Amino acid sequence: MNEFKKYVKKTGDYHGHICFGIAMGTKTTLAAMKYHGLDPDVKNKNLIVYTEIDRCITDAIQVISRCTLSHRTLKYIDYGKFATTFVNLASGKVIRVTIRESCEINDAPKVVEKMAKLSESEVVNIQEVKVNIKEIDLPGIPKKRSYCSVCNEQITDGREVIADKRVLCRACANDKYYVEITKGK
């Protein structure tokens, strides 16, 4: 079994099935890991990944890179694009990876077979870019903690909003994605 098929199986097992996004995420992530000289079988503590979509491709990125939201090494930027940026903190190299080849095949085995036969250069576009990561956004323990003056909930890592000289969470600053039905206890 070639490396691509090995990781497609691994990511498919995690995701629950194999589809276009899993195949593409596997191909792009393996290409990025290779570019950075990183072994996907080893946890890479100096890698931060920005994904631009919340679809299947992101599960492949997470499984292969081992970057996660909870470790603050996987960042989600909602652009709705099949694009990912890989930041190697150790080397300082940063690449943005996009899909060059699109195949409109919904039959998973055919997608996997097609992607397995294509070279990285036929599928993946790698572009060197620069990303300015704020100190407060790096992995590790929270560097700043505050409390919302309205709901009294904790806010970490500089995500608070200052309005009328008051500290507010983004939800209380009128950016809620939810509507309260009852008060919390």
Image (spheres, rainbow, N blue to C red):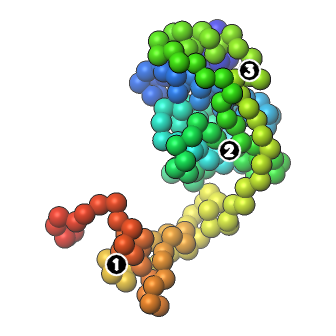
Q: Please tell me the numbered disc located at residue 60.
A: none
| Crowding at mark 3 (Cα within 10 Å: few <14, some 14-19, many 20+) | few
Q: Check if mark 2's residue and mark 1's residue have beta carbons within 8 Å.
A: no
Identify which amino acid the numbered label 1 is placed on.
Asn
Quadrant in which the N terminus is drawn: top right
- Residue 34, compared with residue 160, is above or below; it is above
Foreground tag (2 vs 3): 3
Foreground tag (1 vs 3): 3
Local secondary structure at mark 1: loop
Reading the image, the residue beneath label 3 is: 122
Reading the image, the residue beneath label 2 is: 85
Reading the image, the residue beneath label 1 is: 152
Left or right: residue 117 versus residue 52 is right
> At which x and y percent is residue 151?
31, 77
Report how far apart the C-alphas of labels 1 and 3 lie in the structure.
Answer: 52 Å
Residue 113 picture quarter: top right
> At which x and y percent is residue 21?
52, 27
Local secondary structure at mark 3: helix
Residue at figure coordinates x 54%, y 9% from the top left: 110
Report how far apart the C-alphas of labels 2 and 1 lie in the structure.
Answer: 35 Å
Residue at figure coordinates x 74%, y 32% from the top left: 125
Local secondary structure at mark 2: strand
Q: In the image shown, does 114 or 151 lie closer to the viewer?
A: 114
Identify which amino acid the numbered label 3 is placed on.
Glu
- Residue 67 in sight here: no
Counting residues from the N terminus, which is met first, the one under dot 2 or under dot 3?
A: 2
Quadrant in which the C terminus is drawn: bottom left
> At which x and y percent is residue 86?
70, 43
Identify which amino acid the numbered label 2 is placed on.
Thr
- Residue 72 in sight here: yes
> At which x and y percent is residue 63?
56, 33
